[in-house]
Image: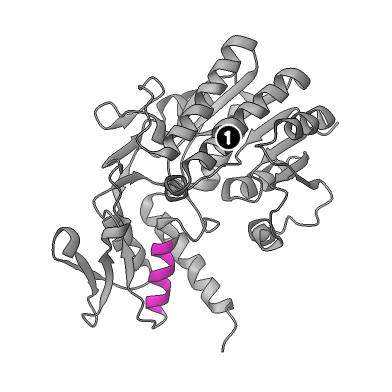
């Protein structure tokens, strides 16, 4: 008998990879999308060749609607529920903090309550975030103190706290994947790694694009998204608990850009300091990257590195790709997209 699995945020990067992997194991996958989700927003599912597969069922669901969450969970009786739907951008949450809290915080609460009332046997897995912890000596692990430096972290902290509450108070079989930055060719165009990869590909194609970035010193723990999606599935099969999924290696935005441009055959020469820092193409001296003060955030954490020791030991979690390989995969994908663009 096939497992029925509900995936919210199914059209996102992680949701698309998760749907692919679940379908490969014979699951009936119910892919929940916001009711007003546009057809062009299905591009990830389309790129993975999933649209039209008989065991993938697209369904409308607004997680901000408690009654709709209850109705879907009661009708489907999923064995597993992966909750990935969220306002996933720090910048978007800064722009509209109330929407981020409503979607990320209350949306999680609505689904937990639906599971408590209608599907107590379901395994619930939340995509949480390393952003909600205060690092200890620059490192985040599962016992670090919760904190919220910005509205995105606040919204995800509320979701994480709700999950712990329902697990402890009601026995809901809920686990949280404390995710650090994980990238892939399916990343949205607003994310910094995708911006960097796209700009590098366009520069290599002869375009004189100047990429504008914020804090070049900000360091992030970058991993490869399909590895983290495998971690989500491992959580659903393990005793309910919270686990950090991370590479444990930090890379600055400056260094990631250097690796990405190198993957496109471009050596960068960094010049200047602070707001005047910029990079030029070593081949011709033309400016490639500049700092944009408007992109600097007061609440940026200078270092955010995860310790996935427990996940490696108890879940078998692993990350297969170093940051140089990740940059190369992203740039290659962008170069392929450029080749497929219609010519004027």
Tell me, yes or no, whether the highlighted magenta stretch contains residue 260. Answer: no
Quadrant housing the C terminus: bottom right
Residue 20 position, x and y percent, is 68, 48
Q: Magenta segment range? A: 195-204
Magenta highlight: main SS: helix
For the point 34% across and 45% down, the residue is 220
Residue 120 visible in the picture: no
What colouring style does the render use?
one colour
Residue 78 vertical placement versus 291 (above, below): above
For the point 53% across and 44% down, the residue is 87
Residue 202 visible in the picture: yes
Tell me, yes or no, whether the highlighted magenta stretch contains residue 199. Answer: yes
Residue 276 vertical placement versus 123 (above, below): below
**Label 1, residues with CA under 10 Å away: few <14, some 14-19, many ≥20:** many
On the picture, is 216 further left or further right than 84?
A: left
On the picture, is 69 further left or further right than 251?
A: right
To which residue does mark 1 refer?
232
Residue 123 vertical placement versus 191 (above, below): above
On the picture, is 321 further left or further right than 271?
A: right
Residue 224 position, x and y percent, is 48, 48
| Nearer the observer, 277 or 38 | 38
The quadrant in which residue 24 appears is: top right
| Nearer the observer, 181 or 315 | 181
For the point 64% across and 12% down, the residue is 171
Residue 46 position, x and y percent, is 69, 60
Quadrant housing the N terminus: top right
Label 1: which secondary element: helix
Residue 233 vertical placement versus 284 (above, below): above
For the point 38% across and 19% down, the residue is 143
């Amino acid at each position: 008998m096939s497992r029925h699995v509900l995936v919210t945020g199914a059209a996102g990067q992680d949701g698309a990879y998760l749907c692919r992997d679940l379908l490969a194991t014979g699951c009936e996958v119910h892919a929940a999308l916001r009711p007003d989700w546009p057809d062009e927003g299905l591009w990830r599912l389309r790129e993975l060749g999933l649209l039209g597969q008989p065991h993938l069922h697209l369904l409308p669901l607004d997680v901000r609607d408690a009654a709709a969450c209850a109705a879907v969970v009661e009708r489907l009786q999923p064995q597993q529920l992966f909750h990935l739907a969220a306002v996933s951008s720090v910048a978007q949450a800064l722009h509209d903090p109330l929407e981020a809290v409503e979607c990320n915080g209350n949306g999680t609460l609505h689904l937990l309550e639906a599971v408590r009332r209608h599907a107590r046997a379901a395994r619930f897995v939340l995509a949480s975030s390393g952003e909600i912890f205060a690092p200890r000596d620059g490192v985040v692990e599962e016992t670090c103190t919760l904190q919220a430096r910005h509205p995105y972290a606040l919204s995800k902290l509320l979701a994480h706290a709700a999950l712990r509450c329902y697990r402890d108070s009601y026995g809901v079989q809920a686990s949280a994947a404390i995710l650090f930055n994980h990238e892939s060719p399916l990343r949205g165009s607003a994310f910094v790694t995708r911006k960097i990869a796209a700009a590098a590909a366009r520069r290599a194609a002869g375009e004189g694009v100047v990429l504008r970035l914020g804090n070049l010193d900000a360091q992030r723990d970058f991993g490869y998204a399909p590895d983290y999606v495998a971690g989500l599935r491992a959580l659903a099969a393990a005793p309910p608990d919270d686990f950090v999924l991370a590479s444990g290696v930090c890379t600055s935005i400056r260094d990631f850009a250097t690796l990405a441009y190198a993957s496109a055959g471009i050596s960068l020469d960094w010049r200047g300091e602070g707001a005047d820092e910029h990079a030029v193409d070593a081949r011709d001296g033309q400016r490639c990257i500049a700092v944009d003060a408007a992109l600097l955030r007061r609440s940026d954490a200078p270092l955010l590195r995860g310790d996935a020791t427990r996940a490696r030991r108890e879940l078998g979690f692993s990350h297969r790709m170093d940051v140089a390989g990740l940059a190369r995969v992203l740039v290659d994908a962008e170069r392929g997209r450029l080749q497929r663009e219609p010519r004027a």
